Amino acid sequence: GDMTFASRSQLEKKSGRVGGSSRFEYLQALVTEFQDTHKKEYKVQVLANLANFAYDPINYEWFRQLNILDLFLDVIAEESDEKMIEFAIGGVCNCCLDKLNKELLLKNDGVELAVKCLSSSSEETVLSAITSLMFLTTPQSKQEITAENIVQPMKQFSTSSNIRLRNLAVIFLEVFISLSRSFPPSLSLSPSLGFTLAILF
């Protein structure tokens, strides 16, 4: 509604950022560059930029208009380059606390694609995938997210020698397995838990 636009322009004034229309144009230019270039290192650079913009809710409306969430998911589905996948799941992870983004990601196989990233050899990719699965948990998706094909790798990660991985997997198992037994319909992850996780890791 109108409030979003008011708060958006106030935020932009306060932080002296790129104005709205030029931000949209910049994101659009990034997407175009990603689609037009054949050079892998350029694609990686564009994905890194987009994943960074995904931290800021101000950009989400434009992300949806420009199908950037789908672009992230397509990269995870189709690419084999580890760096590209790392930035793509990083972008998904940064976006998925937002309610509309979450719905879009759930509708477009976000859970399945995050699960695919659990087998990556990149630590950052796996951490982003676990966090994404946490944030994508809703009363509707919880059955899929607490299924054996996800719980099994989490159990393995929970005994990992990698502390970041182990801590995150332990949280996943404790929080989500207990939730799956008694999931209050109103409960889905709050942004504050996101910040708690960010501080922890």
Image (cartoon, rainbow, N blue to C red):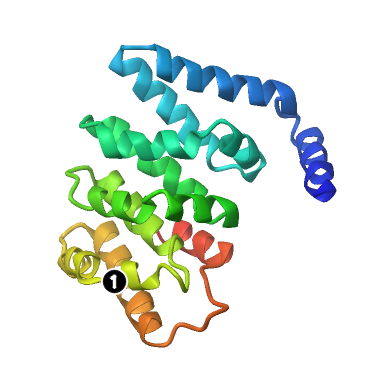
Instruction: From the viewer's side, name the closer residue of 72 and 67.
Output: 67
Q: Which three-letter amino acid code belongs to the residue tagged 1?
A: Val
Q: Which residue is mark 1?
A: 170
User: Compared with residue 74, is residue 24 higher up or lower down, i.e. above or below?
Assistant: above
* Residue found 63% across the figure and 34% down from its top: 62
Q: In the figure, is residue 163 to the left or right of 21?
A: left
Image position of 67 with respect to 19: above or below: below
9 left or right of 37 in image: right
- Residue situated in front as seen by the camera: 109 or 4: 109
**Quadrant of res 57:** top right
Number of numbered discs visible in the structure rendering: 1
Give left or right: position of 18 versus 184. right
Farthest-out residue, front: 107
> With respect to residue 17, does 38 lie above or below?
above
Q: Position of residue 8 (x, y in %)?
A: 77, 41
Q: Position of residue 113 (x, y in %)?
A: 30, 49
Residue projecting furthest to the bottom: 182
The residue that appears at 70% across and 25% down in the rendered structure is 18
Q: Is residue 90 above or below residue 145?
A: above
Q: Looking at the rendering, in which quadrant would you find the C terminus? A: bottom left
